[in-house]
Structures are given as C-alpha cells and as structure tokens.
Amino acid sequence: MPDGLRLVGHKGADLIAPGNTLESFAAAVEAGVDTIELDVLWTRDGHPRIAAAERTPLWIAHDWHDAERRTPLTLDEALRSFTEPPLDRVEIDLDIKLPGREEEIVAAVREHGLLERAMISTMELSTLARIGELEPGLRRGWTYPKVTKDWASKRWAKAPMLAALVWMRRRLPGLAARELPKLGVEAMWVYHPLVSPQLARIAALAEVELIAWTVDDHSRMRKLVSAGVTGICSNDPRLFAELNTHSALPVRFSNPTGTKGAPEG
C-alpha cells in the first residue's frame, strides 16, 4: 500500500489537453499527479487471431472510434516517453481495454524497464489472471464495473442506470470481500458513485488500494477521501492542489526535482 493519496491523471489530463497524448501526459505531470492512466487496445487489424507479424500494433486509445479519428501513439512509443523527462518521475497505469495480447504488453513494460513503476488495470478477469501468470511482480488492478457502452450519455438510460448503481453499491462490499483474495490484485479501480465507507474498509482489510474513477468535481473528491479511498483518478488534475488541506492521507505529488525513479510507496 502506498503512503498517501494516489493522484491519477485520467488519460493524462483529458480536460487540459486531449487525452492519451504526450501533451496530455506532460500537462498531468505539470499539474502534480504521481500516476498517469493510459488506455491500451488493439483494433480490428490487430485482433489476437491475426498472425503476430501481420497485425497492427497496440494503440494508446480509449476505443476504436478514438483510434480511427486520429493517429494514436503506439504502446512502444508511449512507454518510451515514460523513460524520459518529464514523464520519468511518475508511475503509470495501463488500462487494458481488450483481452488477448497480454504477452506483448508484459514484454513491452519489461523491455522499457518499467516493471516497478507500472500497474495493469482492466475489467477483463482473464487478462488479470494472464498478467499474473506472465509477470507476478507486475502490479494489477481490478476495474469495476465492467461496462461496454457509455450509458450515461443516453437520456433514456439514466433512470435504470441510477437504479442499477444503487443496487451495485449495496452489493459491492460483499463482492469485494469474496473476490479480492481470489484475484490477488494490488488495487481496485471503482466507478466513484459505487464507493462507500464499507467498501473502503474491505479494501483496507485486503491491503488493496481503492482508487475512484473518474472524478472531476472537487466536492466529490473530498467526500471520497472522507469515505476512505486511497486514490482518485481525474480528467482535471489541477483539482488535486486543494486536496492536501482536506485529506486524512498525505497527498502524493510528483517529484518536483524531476529526479528519475518511481515515487515512494
């Protein structure tokens, strides 16, 4: 468990500069994050069933639409950037969107010397298990819940979605108590409306980080800290500057000297 509240920039700093880009990553470091979350996925031409020599690279993009509308970084390009200033002073979380190419991901993290500074998070339980087999020393995070569409953007879905969130929030502490010991992960990344003090206690007993995503409201951040989260993921890491006066945990800002290496914890 880290010392202090983990401050995570979602896709870098998506509300400062377009996410999953070098500009966004740099903006997140400038805002003081200690961890940057970036999305990793394959597209249609990179399906795991295609021969390795013929398929496209792993991309740093949120979904296929995001990957198609711009020229995204490759996983190799992104990881290389985290070995150079200013990105060499933060930790990274690779949010794996699709299962099936775990061997390449682990090999790339290892090749760039980032095993100690990296975490793999995903909603895919098969990916969590495979990463654990390939590299037991690579930290893993279980992302909950598993979603395949942005239901919050659909007006007709708001009422049933709210009802579903209430139900999930009530059952999540029990689910976490059963599953966290089985999964053996180091962190649980939870959609912030589902966080409760009961869930925080379960995570603490399991010695697992509880990281709330994605929070872009300062008052909500304070409530989550009071509930017991150990990390917050935000599109606007500038909001983190005010948290130090409200958090029971010391806030972990990135190394201001730019000294190479991982933050403590």
Image (cartoon, rainbow, N blue to C red):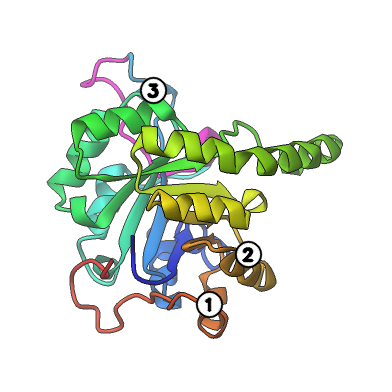
Magenta-drawn segment: 50-66
Q: Residue at x 33, y 56 (%)?
A: 92
* Residues marked 2 and 3 touching at CB (< 8 Å): no
Is residue 220 found left or right of 233 in the rendered image? right
Instruction: Give the Cα separation between the discs numbered 2 and 1.
Output: 16 Å
Residue type at numbered disc 2: Asp
Residue 204, percent across and down? 44, 55
Residue at which label 1 appears: 247
Label total for image: 3
**Which of pointers 2 and 3 lies earlier in the amino acid sequence?**
3
Which quadrant is the C terminus positioned in?
A: bottom left
Residue type at numbered disc 1: Ser
Element on which disc 1 rests: loop
* Residues marked 2 and 1 touching at CB (< 8 Å): no
Instruction: Give the Cα separation between the discs numbered 1 and 3.
Output: 46 Å
Which quadrant is the N terminus positioned in?
A: bottom left
